[in-house]
Amino acid sequence: MALNGTNVNQVIALEVGVPRGEHPSPQWKRANWQSLNGTWEFAFDDERQGVQEKWQMDGEFPLIIQVPFSFESTLSGIGDRQRHDVVWYRRRFPSSPSWVNHRVWLHFGAVDYRATVWVNGQVVTTHEGGHTPFSCDVADFLSDEDNTLVVMAEDFTEDLSLPRGKQYWKDQSESIFYTRTTGIWQSVWLEILPIEHIQSMTCTADLDAEAIDLNVDLEIAAEAPVTAQLELELEIRFDGALVESVRIPARRQIAQRLYVGGKDREVYHWSPDHPNLYDLNLRLLNNGELVDEVESYFGMRRFEVINGRILLNNRPYFLRLVLDQGYFPDGNLTPPSDEAIRHDVELTKALGFNGARKHQKVEDPRYLYWCDKIGLLVWGEMSNAYEFSSISVQRLAREWTEAILRDRNHPCIVAWVPLNESWGAPNLLHDQRQRAFLTAMYHLTKALDSTRPVISNDGWEHTRSDLCTIHDYECDRDVLAARYRDCDTALRATPGGKLIYAPTYHYEGEPIVISEMGGISFRVSEQEGWGYSAAVSEVDFLDRYRAVVEPMYTSPVVQGFCYTQLTDVEQEINGLLTYERIPKADIEALRRITTGEFLRKGEA
């Protein structure tokens, strides 16, 4: 079976040493940028002596690494899975005449966990948080000739108060935990900006009004020169045709509504079946001359809960999600290439799913771009810590805020999940502070983005949540059918021995979604591992898959499910695909089960 020219059995790899050249921020693109991915000098600092010895000035960097791959991955060119909590990077790059009278911004997609950055021996920024981006203006630190960029990354393997997701604190992967990621693991790039420029934007679709609401921040002087006439031009196009264009006086903060409908214009909604995207260009003009331009896009999409029903674009919608860890055999958390990201999205859709729950990973923006473009719903989820303390609360809240601000314009994201299975709040039943933490995270998320449902604690022990999500790895069809025959039986059940709601919180009619289920192991290669139940043949695998999916469709109360999982990962072999993305059964047979088509056709 071919997917837009890509064979489903193809294993996509990136030649070591070839930099990833696609734009790292596809929803916020300028033409003038430079990738810093590729070959960097590298050093371990197990004795933590680099700062004292001033490695940022003239340290020895004996190794070579391929950025953006962490040293634990084979694609980094190092492939060392031993613990090294402090690592150093160095990259030299020349200055450019085009930088004169401009600002030069240095961007990092993600560095795990704490980063200190020097340019030409001077500290330019620090950042804590292993899954979110950070940037700084380095124009004032650059030389007229060659420049030296140095990064020290510090991880804290045994500190369980760090948001870490599935990264294991022990030396060898086991159970549900995988290889650690230390240091740079997403793209690094330079962006050339004029002194006055477009800083940021939020875009909210209003389907009823057939409009979008833009909030744009500009970096402009408090008092522009008398000769300056600064304007912001906003232009919307669909499939190349002009939809709307306006020019408005430039201010530091601008709120503007633009209409995509009216005047006999058809409005094209975004959905997995019809992933229609509008192009949006933002231009800053001075006396009619172009100063700055950003290319973006948006989708006309609404996802909400009304009267206990999940609605997509004002219509009831059944969720067919797959749990996706976002790990790769050679890159770990970093995809080997942009083609590999697209391939995962295409495979997910070919298997019959209309969405993915990215599990314990703040995903690369390139993944969200392909979900926007190809049409796949995404639940955005934070990587959690594993102990509760005031510092763990601060760390998670800060990093989660950064993740939402980065990703909230993507139409593919339809739900936010700050916590999973009480990770980072393990004593909810007896500690009011931990319950308050969950509820606070719900309200913080709503304050940052009121347009999407929020699940405070996916799986069980909910406090305030817009969806009632349940994790249930029961493999018996009859047991599942009986359990989800009505709301009362569903809410009385305690899969995994956990209460669905935390003390003092109760079900208030939220849609019920079984957001983890299945987990059927099936070994088809040399890789060994485990699952929640086991199949012995392809026929048995399909039968078992059908047995757990069928009750989701026949239940009168379940409004969606999330199957565990898309691929095998390290010691887990409970994927529909192998770790190398090879389907374990006929992909069309899997699709018929995923979509419930087998029920409509009356298959046994």
Image: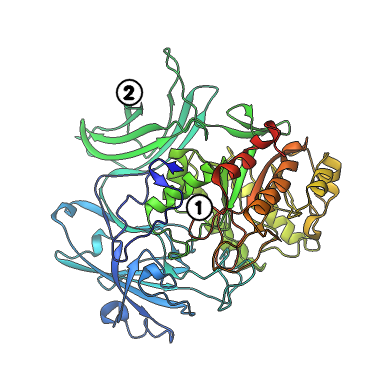
Q: Where residue 376 sits in the image (x, y, percent)?
A: 52, 41
Q: Is residue 117 left or right of residue 372?
A: left
Instruction: Please tell me whether residue 223 is drawn above or below residue 279 in the rendered image.
Output: below
Residue 224 in sight from this viewpoint: no
The residue positioned 57% from the left and 73% from the top of the image is 173
* Res 503 → quadrant: bottom right
Which secondary structure lies at badge 2?
A: strand
Instruction: Please tell me whether residue 590 is drawn above or below residue 502 in the rendered image.
Output: above
**Residue 403: image tag:** 1
Foreground: 213 or 571?
571
Which quadrant is the C terminus positioned in? Answer: top right
Which secondary structure lies at badge 1?
A: helix
Q: CA distance from mark 2 to mark 1?
A: 32 Å
Q: Is residue 408 left or right of residue 467?
A: left
* Res 388 → quadrant: bottom right
Foreground: 439 or 558?
558
Give the residue type at disc 1. Ala
Residue 121 in sight from this viewpoint: yes
**Residue 145: image tag:** none
Q: Where residue 35 sits in the image (x, y, percent)?
A: 28, 57
**Tag 2 residue:** 242
10 Å crowding of disc 2: few (<14), some (14-19), many (20+)? few
Of the image marks 2 and 1, the number of the one nearer the N terminus: 2
Q: Where residue 105 sits in the image (x, y, percent)?
A: 30, 55
* Res 51 → quadrant: bottom left
Foreground: 145 or 568?
568
Give the residue type at disc 2. Leu
